[in-house]
Amino acid sequence: VTAILSLAAACSSAGVTVLYARDVGYCNNKNAPMPCQKFQLSVALAFGTWFLIALSSLIMFWLLASV
């Protein structure tokens, strides 16, 4: 359940970041009031966290099945 919720949060954050960075062009301005690179980094780390949670869930399921 945690992995699915983490993936949903990462996907929604990525959607907002793409909206600001590419669609609206909000990050192309040098005087942008929001740090867009930090948003992109946080989305990348969110997907990395989701991958690690999913891997941990898979390993725990495998250990449970082997007992």
Image (tube, grey):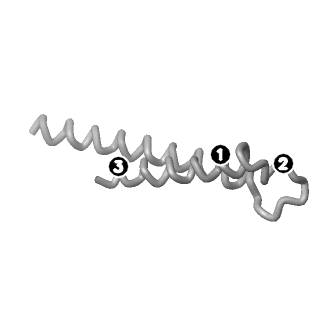
Secondary structure of the residue carrying numbered label 1: helix
Asked which secondary structure carries label 2, the reply is: loop
Name the mark on residue 18. Answer: 1
Residue, x 15% and y 42% (percent of image)? 64
Q: Amino acid at mark 3?
A: Ile
Q: Which mark is residue 28?
A: 2
Left of 6 or right of it: where is 41?
A: right
- Pointer 3 residue: 4
Say which amino acid is labelled 1.
Val
Q: Earlier in the sequence, mark 3 or mark 1?
A: 3
Alpha carbon of mark 1 to alpha carbon of mark 2: how far?
Answer: 12 Å
Residue placed furthest toward the right: 30
Q: Is residue 17 left or right of residue 5?
A: right
Q: Which residue type carries mark 2?
A: Asn
User: At which x and y percent is residue 36?
Assistant: 74, 54
User: Is 55 in front, or is 36?
Assistant: 36
